[in-house]
Amino acid sequence: MEKFEEKMKAAGLSEAAIGAFRLNYEQLVAGVTGLMPEKDIEAVSELPHLKDLEASDQGNLKSLLEQTAVLKLNGGLGTSMGLEKAKSLLPVKDGKTFLDLIAEQVVYTREKFGSKVRFILMNSFSTSEDTKAYLSKSHGELIREEDAELLQNKSPKVDAATMQPISWPKDPSQEWCPPGHGDIYPSLLGSGMLERLSKAGIKYLFVSNSDNLGATLDVSLLSYFAQSDKAFIMEVAERTAADKKGGHLCRRLSDGRFMLRESAMCTDDDKASFEDISKHKFFNTNNLWVNLPKLKAKLEASNGVLKLPLIKNKKTVNPRDSSSPPVFQLETAMGSAIECFDDPGAVVVPRERFAPVKTTNDLFGLRSDAYKVTEAHTVVLAAPKGPLVKLDDKHYKLVDKMDALTDAVPSLIHATSLTVKGPVRFQAGTSFTGDVLVTNESSEPQALPPKAYKDSIVNLTPAAVPA
C-alpha cells in the first residue's frame, strides 16, 4: 500500500481519497468476494410511495430549499456511444443539452420558490474543462457560483500480476481510473466542500446522474426527507422483467440493515431468486438524498472513510489494447452507502424519475415527440407509454453514425415499438404508430419514404440487380 500512497500523494490526492482507496485495496488483497447468499437476506416488501407524500407549505419549502443543494454526477464521457466529451453536452431536446435543461431546472426552482437552492456538478478530470467552458457561455451565473464544481478523485490501477501500482510509460494517464460514483463521499470530505456547505447551512443534498432527466428536485420528497430526519434516503422503482438482472434492495438478516445486492454478489444457485421480481421488488434509481450533518458525523466516527463494498473490475491497462497488461480497477457505488447508516430509508418513485440515456436507442426516443419539455424545463412523457426503440447496433450504436442517418427524428408519440435492422435514413414527415419493423439487408443506407406507418413491416432492401 505504501507505493500506492506515495503515488497518490504525488498526484495531489487528499487523505480522504487515499483512505478510501486503502479500504478497497485491503478488500482486494484479502480476497473479499462480496457474495451475499439468498439465505442471508430478506426481501423488502413494503415502502412508502412518493404519490402518498405531501409537500410542506410554501413558506416552509422556501426555508428547506435554502438548506438544499442539488448535485449532478457529471463525470461520464459516454464512450460507449462514441463520445469523447461529457455526455451531458449532447443535444437531447429542441437543441438543448442535458446541461442546459439541468441548469434551467435549477433557475426555475429558484424563481418559483424565491430560494437559492445550491447547484453543484461533480466532474471528472475528463469532463471538467469542457463542462465549465460550455456553462460559462450558456449559464455563466451558475458555474461561477461558489462550490459549483466538485472534482472527482482518481484511483491508481492495480497490476493484476504483482498487486502493485501499474506503470505504463507509453501513456501515464492510463495508470489511473475513475473510482466510481461512491467517490462522492471522499471527494466531499477531502475537497473541504462538506465542511463549507455545512458552515453555509446546507443540510440536504439531492444527488442524481446528469444523464437522467427524470431526476428533478421533488419538493414532496425534500419535505419527507427533512421531516423523517433520516441520514440517507434512496429512491427506488419497481422492478420489471427488463430489470431482473439488475441489482435490488434487500435487508441483511445479520443486522437488519438495508443493502444493495448486485448480480455479482450471487452464486449460480441464487440466480433464480435474484431475478424473481415478485420477491425482490425494488431497484436503486441512483437518485439519493443525503443529510450532510449526519454524513459528516459518520465520516468523523469512521476515520473519514465509509466502508463501501468493493467493485473489482478486471481490465487491461490500455482498455483499447487487449494485449496490454491486465489490471484491477477498484470502484465503489454511492448507493451502497445505504448500509453504512443506522437510520436510512427508501421511497418508491414512479418510473418517470428513472429515465437515463445509456444508449442511442434511449437518445433517439428522447429526441422524438414521445417526450416533451415542460414549463419547469423537465422532460416528461407526452405519450401514454414510452416507445421501445431498437436500432441496429452496427449502424446506430455511435451518436455520430445515428445522426448521419437521421435527417429528422420521426414521430413516435403513437408508437409502441420501433425496430430497425440495417442502415435506414429517416426524413422529415415520418411517423410510426403501434409496432413497426424497418429492414434493409444491404450495406448501403436506404431512405425510408416519409409517411405514416402503422403496425407494419417495411423492407427497404434493394432488388437484386440481374446478372
Image (tube, rainbow, N blue to C red):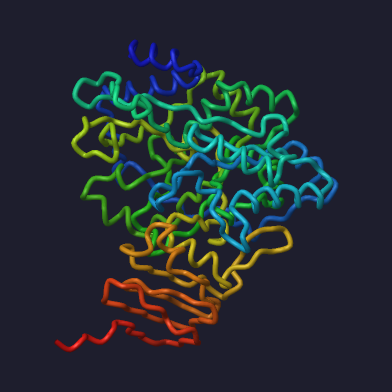
Q: Is residue 229 above or below residue 298?
A: below
Q: Residue at x 48, y 27 (%)?
A: 153
Expressed as whole percent of the image width and height from the top left, the position of residue 150 reads 59, 31
Q: Is residue 388 above or below residue 107?
A: below
Q: Residue at x 81, y 43 (%)?
A: 115
Image quadrant occupied by the C terminus: bottom left
Expressed as whole percent of the image width and height from the top left, the position of residue 280 reads 40, 55
Q: Is residue 280 above or below residue 86?
A: below
Expressed as whole percent of the image width and height from the top left, the position of residue 186 reads 51, 25
Q: Residue at x 47, y 42 (%)?
A: 76
Q: Nearer the viewer, residue 461 or 24?
A: 461
Q: Nearer the viewer, residue 428 or 315?
A: 428
Q: Is residue 50 visible?
A: yes
Image quadrant occupied by the N terminus: top left
Q: Is residue 267 above or below residue 278?
A: above
On screen, residue 166 versus residue 95, left or right, reads: left
> Farthest front residue?
467
> Farthest left residue?
467
Q: Nearer the viewer, residue 240 or 110?
A: 110
Q: Is residue 235 visible?
A: no
Q: Residue at x 66, y 59 (%)?
A: 378
Q: Nearer the viewer, residue 153 or 86?
A: 86
On screen, residue 253 versus residue 465, left or right, reads: right
Dividing the picture into quadrants, the one containing residue 23 is top left
Expressed as whole percent of the image width and height from the top left, the position of residue 301 reads 54, 19
